[in-house]
Image (cartoon, rainbow, N blue to C red):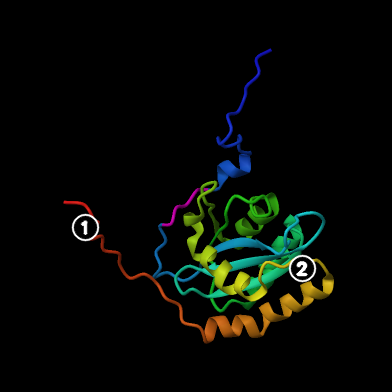
């Protein structure tokens, strides 16, 4: 019997579902509204033991519109329910969702939902945060700066966080905070180069 060993750092063999989902780099047309980066932010404090709150963070690439929804754990069905709640709140049509490779996103529930609703589905390359940079930057400014690095693991805390996401925080972040985007990047000579 021949044993196939996988070297550390190399990707695991992917399921058939992973093979169906196209990989997208950071090559968005920001003049089109409706393309969404999605990600999770953990509220586990210093320990990932047990159940704790996770914030689903959704950012529209072209406008910078942001939505959040908290769930307990990272289950596939609660994740889909949270995405549906967020979709009902957004003032635009969803064209594409783009998560990282988290199994909470890459699963039959979300795949089937996107197929039924005619929403394109792409994902990032493994371990490449820049492929989903639009949502990654909002994870800091819209979630971690607000809730910090504390552990939230009660239903009461979950309800408070969701009340903020569904009301004051989303209104404040989307209507009263400026969205800045890089217009162009010009590389000028480096120090010490001739």
Q: Nearer the viewer, mark 2 or mark 1?
A: 1
- The magenta segment: 22-26
* Circle 2 residues within 10 Å: few <14, some 14–19, many ≥20: many
- Place residue 146 in its image quadrant: bottom right
Mark positioned earlier in the residue sequence (2 or 1): 2
* Circle 1 residues within 10 Å: few <14, some 14–19, many ≥20: few
11 vs 191: above or below:
above
As measured in the structure, the alpha-carbon distance from the residue carrying label 2 to the one carrying label 1 is: 48 Å
18 vs 96: above or below:
above
Residue at 72% in and 76% down? 162
Tell me the element at label 1. loop
Based on the picture, tell me whether residue 145 belongs to the magenta stretch: no
Residue at 61% in and 58% down? 114
Residue at 73% in and 55% down? 76
The chief SS type of the magenta part is loop
The residue that label 2 is drawn on is 152
């Amino acid at each position: 019997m021949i044993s196939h060993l996988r070297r550390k750092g190399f990707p695991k063999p992917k399921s058939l579902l992973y093979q169906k989902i196209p990989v997208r780099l950071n090559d968005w047309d920001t003049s089109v509204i409706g393309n969404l980066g999605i990600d999770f932010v953990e509220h586990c404090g210093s320990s990932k033991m047990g159940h704790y709150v996770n914030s689903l963070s959704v950012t529209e690439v072209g406008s910078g519109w942001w939505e959040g929804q908290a769930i307990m754990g990272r289950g596939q069905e609660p994740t889909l329910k949270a995405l549906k709640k967020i979709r009902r709140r957004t003032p635009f049509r969803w064209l594409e969702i783009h998560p990282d490779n988290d199994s909470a996103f890459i699963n039959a529930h979300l795949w089937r939902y996107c197929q039924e609703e005619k929403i394109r589905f792409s994902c990032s390359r493994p371990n490449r945060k820049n492929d989903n940079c639009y949502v990654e930057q909002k994870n800091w400014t819209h979630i971690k700066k607000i809730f910090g690095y504390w552990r939230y693991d009660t239903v009461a805390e979950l309800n408070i966080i969701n009340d903020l996401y569904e009301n004051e925080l989303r209104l404040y972040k989307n209507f009263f905070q400026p969205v800045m985007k890089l217009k162009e990047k010009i590389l000028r000579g480096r120090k010490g180069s001739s």
